[in-house]
Image (tube, rainbow, N blue to C red):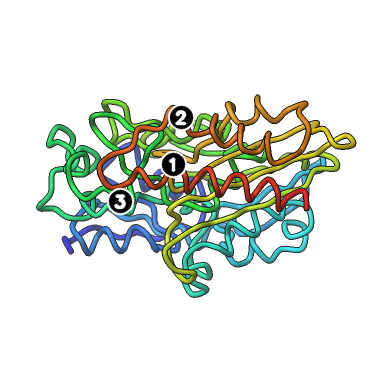
Amino acid sequence: MRAFAFQRSSSVDDAVAAHGSSSANSFVAGGTTLIDLLKLDVMRPERVVDINRLPLSTIEPTPNGGLRVGALVRNSDLAWHPDVKERYPVLSAALLAGASAQLRNMATTAGNLLQRTRCPYFRDNRSACNKREPGTGCSALEGFNRIHAVLGGSDACIATHPSDMCVALAVLDVDIHVQGPEGERTIPFSGFHLLPGNTPERESALRPGELITSITLGPPVEGARQHYLKLRDRESFEFALASAAVVISRDGNHIREVRVALGGVGTIPWRSREAEDVLRGAPADETIFEAAATAALRDAQPRRFNAFKIPLAQQALRRALAEALA
């Protein structure tokens, strides 16, 4: 671990000022990603600004019937909050499927949004990685790429987005509120995570020095059922090989409204509009679930070791849809 300056802040304004607009500085709260990457010499901040004392740890109702979640709300507190369990069960289930109880007690809402990939080549300084060092290449393309993405990749990067929480947020109406050197602004969740393209080192729409202060959840879809399903090598403390989050409502036996997102297979939390187009207005049966699963993975680009993720993700989506309506 390299030496860095350390500063605690007690207000959002102080934290933003202490960080400045330098990309060489970092904020830290739970530290469940940053500390690991500091030890591995993957992240090398010149200054770390501790934001744990900021008043950003509350969950409050919004005037339109949604929830405002502070950036420092711990994953455990969010998962077990009565309003989240009752009105956003897909989010509660996704959070409880992630990491371990100890990590969920430390990890924060904002930190989870910014969680970095578990690609072993990214975390190994001896390997070529465009995300860690732009222009060096991507060892995963021809390497052991079993855990890597089949959707949203490029010739520069196929690293998978690791967050369970973000897959659930992708099927909810979510805005992300930030404050930085240029003031406050709101980023729709759908535009927050960036595809790697030719710049995989740029992972989010945050500008230099911006701090996430909260997220807002819009009112849940009226009459809809929600479900999150995660498939992985082992039940405890393991990242998804494939996961599916669904929000679905119906009139009689026909699907009225539906939202679908996939995890474990994309370079970002993967909202599948293709699957939604197949499902919306169709009869809720296994035949249409199969068609939706096919559509969701139609553009998948497997590599040598991860082609199995395509049928696995299709199975996850079919099961999630069936279990949501069971």
Q: Secondary structure at mark 2?
A: loop
Farthest-out residue, left: 126
Q: Could you tell which of marks 3 and 1 lies nearer the N-terminus?
A: 3
Residue 166, given in percent of the width and then of the height, sits at 53, 47
Where is mark 2, residue-wise?
182
- Residue at position x 51%, y 59% in the image: 108
Q: Nearer the viewer, mark 2 or mark 1?
A: 1
Q: For the residues carrying marks 3 and 2, which lies nearer the camera in this image?
A: 3
**Distance of mark 3 from mark 2, alpha carbons?**
41 Å
Q: Is label 1 in a helix, a strand or a loop?
A: helix
Q: Nearer the viewer, residue 242 or 15?
A: 242
Relative to 37, is 266 on the left or the right? right
Residue 46, visible in the rendered structure: no
Residue type, label 3 = Arg
Residue 120 is left or right of residue 276, and the answer is left
Location of residue 265 in the rendering, given as x and y in whole percent from the top left corner:
43, 43
Instruction: Tell me which amino acid carries mark 1.
Output: Ile
Q: Which residue is mark 3?
A: 146
* Tag 1 residue: 310
